[in-house]
Image: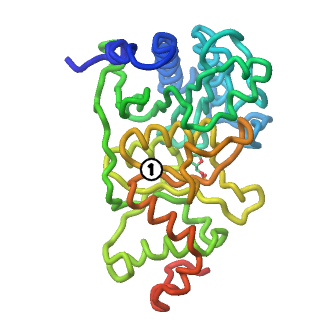
C-alpha cells in the first residue's frame, strides 16, 4: 500500500521549524481540497459555478462564483490551523487569524477559473511562510519575504484525478486522492524534471506584444529541425498553470508567461507570491529552474502580496537558455539572417 499523505507528513516532522504545525496545516488544506473537488464534480449543486460575479479581485480579474467558494473553504482550513496571516488572490488585504501563530499562507484558491465552464483542470496554489515577530505589527510584510523563505509549497489539481503536488523542502512529491481510502496516497515520490525540454508552453496569441528576445526564442523553437535548435518541439497551453506545471514535472518542458506590451502586462499576468513562488519551489525541488526571465524567482523580493512577475520555469537547461536570450539582446543580431527573421507569425 503506497504511503499516505498523513504518513509522509509524519515522516517529515523531524526536520526544520514548526514541522508539526506545518503538517497540520497541510492536512487541513487537503481536506479543504476534497470539499472543493466534491463541489466541482457535483456541478456546484446547481449553481453556475463558472458564472461571473459583478466583482473583480485585487488584481482586477473577474471573480467567478467558484473563486469565492474556494476562498472561503481554504480560509476555514487556515483558521483551523496555526496560521497568523492568510493572503489570498481573492482578498485585497491579508487577513489576520491567530496573531501569535508561527505560519502564514499565501494562496490562489482557484487558479484557472476561466476554465471551469469548459471542464478543464483547475487548481489551488499555496505557499507557506514563517512568521517572525517583526511581521506581526504589519501582516503585509510577511508576504514580502522572498520565495526562498518558504517552508512548504504546492498545488492541488482538480482534474480527472484530484492530485496534490507538494514540497516541504525535501524533494517534490505527488499524492492522489483515493475516495475509497478517503484520503491522499503517494502517487509519485521525488519528481525529477527532465533537463532537456521537448515541449514549450506559452500563449502564442500574445506574439505581437512580446519583446524581440522572446519572439526570437519562440521563433527558434518553431523553426524546429530546420532552425538553430536543429530539433522539433511540441507546444501545449492549457490555460491552467497547475496543469502545465504538472506536465512539465512529469515529462520536462518549459513554461513562459513573459511581460508584454499590453496595458497592465509589463510584468506579465502571474502573481509572484501565491503563483510563481510556490510553483518555483516545487520545480526547483524537482531539479528544474524558475526565473523571471533572467533572475531566480525565489530570490525576488516581492513588493506586495499581489505583485506580478514574468515567469519562466521547467527544464533547467531550457530555462537557462531563455535567460541567455533575454540577457543579451545584441546576440540576436548575430543570429543567422535566415533564422533571425524567420517566423511563422506575422510580426
Ligand atoms: P492567459 C489562469 O488564469 C492563469 O493565472 C494561469 O493558470 C494560466 O497559465 C494563465 O493565467 C493563462 O493566462 O492569458 O493565457 O489566459
Q: Position of residue 252 (x, y in %)?
A: 34, 52
Q: Residue at x 26, y 18 (%)?
A: 3
Element type at mark 1: strand
Residue 158 vertical placement versus 27 (above, below)? below
Left or right: 1 as drawn, with respect to 64: left
Mark 1 residue's CB less than 8 Å from ligand 1: no
Residue 14 vertical placement versus 274 (above, below)? above
Front residue of 223 and 318: 318
Which residue, as the protein is rendered here, is positioned at the far bottom? 337
| Residue at the disc numbered 1 | 289
From this viewpoint, is residue 344 visible? yes
* Quarter of the C terminus within the rendering: bottom right
Q: Residue at x 73, y 29 (%)?
A: 141
Q: Position of residue 308 (x, y in %)?
A: 68, 47
Residue 43 vertical placement versus 293 (above, below)? above
Among the 4 quarters of the image, the one containing residue 79: top right
From this viewpoint, is residue 183 visible? no
* Quarter of the N terminus within the rendering: top left
Front residue of 106 and 343: 106
Q: Residue at x 47, y 26 (%)?
A: 41
Q: Position of residue 55 (x, y in %)?
A: 79, 35
Residue 14 vertical placement versus 229 (above, below)? above
Among the 4 quarters of the image, the one containing residue 63: top right
Q: Position of residue 143 (x, y in %)?
A: 68, 31
Left or right: 254 as drawn, with respect to 55: left
Please say which color scheme the image uses.
Answer: rainbow
Front residue of 346 and 103: 103
Left or right: 10 as drawn, with respect to 326: left
Question: Crowdedness of circle 1 by 10 Å Cα count: few (<14), some, many (20+)?
Answer: many
Q: Residue at x 53, y 80 (%)?
A: 331
Amino acid at each position: 500500500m503506497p504511503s499516505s499523505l498523513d504518513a509522509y507528513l509524519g515522516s517529515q516532522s523531524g526536520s526544520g521549524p514548526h514541522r508539526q504545525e506545518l503538517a497540520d496545516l497541510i492536512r487541513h488544506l487537503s481536506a479543504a481540497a476534497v470539499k472543493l473537488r466534491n463541489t466541482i464534480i457535483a456541478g456546484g449543486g446547481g449553481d453556475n459555478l463558472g458564472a461571473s460575479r459583478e466583482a473583480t479581485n485585487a488584481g482586477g480579474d473577474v471573480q467567478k462564483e467558484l473563486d469565492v467558494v474556494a476562498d472561503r473553504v481554504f480560509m476555514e482550513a487556515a483558521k483551523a490551523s496555526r496560521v497568523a496571516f492568510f493572503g489570498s488572490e481573492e482578498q485585497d488585504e491579508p487577513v489576520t487569524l491567530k496573531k501569535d501563530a508561527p505560519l502564514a499562507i499565501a494562496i490562489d484558491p482557484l487558479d484557472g477559473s476561466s476554465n471551469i465552464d469548459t471542464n478543464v483542470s483547475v487548481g489551488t496554489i499555496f505557499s507557506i511562510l514563517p512568521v517572525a515577530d517583526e511581521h506581526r505589527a504589519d501582516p503585509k510584510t510577511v508576504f514580502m519575504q522572498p520565495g526562498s523563505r518558504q517552508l512548504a509549497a504546492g498545488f492541488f489539481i482538480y482534474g480527472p484525478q484530484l492530485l496534490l503536488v507538494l514540497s516541504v523542502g525535501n524533494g517534490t512529491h505527488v499524492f492522489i486522492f483515493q475516495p475509497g481510502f478517503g484520503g491522499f496516497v503517494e502517487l509519485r515520490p521525488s519528481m525529477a524534471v527532465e533537463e532537456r525540454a521537448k515541449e514549450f508552453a506559452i500563449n502564442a496569441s500574445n506574439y505581437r506584444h512580446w519583446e524581440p528576445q522572446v519572439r526570437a526564442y519562440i521563433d527558434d523553437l518553431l523553426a524546429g529541425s530546420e532552425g538553430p535548435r536543429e530539433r522539433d518541439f511540441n507546444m501545449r497551453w492549457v490555460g491552467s498553470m497547475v496543469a502545465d506545471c504538472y506536465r512539465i514535472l512529469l515529462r520536462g518542458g518549459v513554461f513562459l508567461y513573459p511581460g508584454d506590451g499590453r496595458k497592465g502586462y509589463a510584468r506579465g499576468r502571474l502573481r509572484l507570491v501565491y503563483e510563481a513562488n510556490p510553483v518555483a519551489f516545487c520545480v526547483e525541488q524537482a531539479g528544474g529552474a524558475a526565473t523571471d526571465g533572467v533572475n531566480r524567482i525565489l530570490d525576488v523580493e516581492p513588493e506586495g502580496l499581489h505583485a506580478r512577475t514574468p515567469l519562466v520555469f521547467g527544464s533547467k537547461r531550457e530555462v537557462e537558455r531563455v535567460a541567455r536570450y533575454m540577457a543579451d539582446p545584441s546576440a540576436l543580431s548575430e543570429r543567422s539572417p535566415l533564422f533571425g527573421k524567420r517566423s511563422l507569425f506575422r510580426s
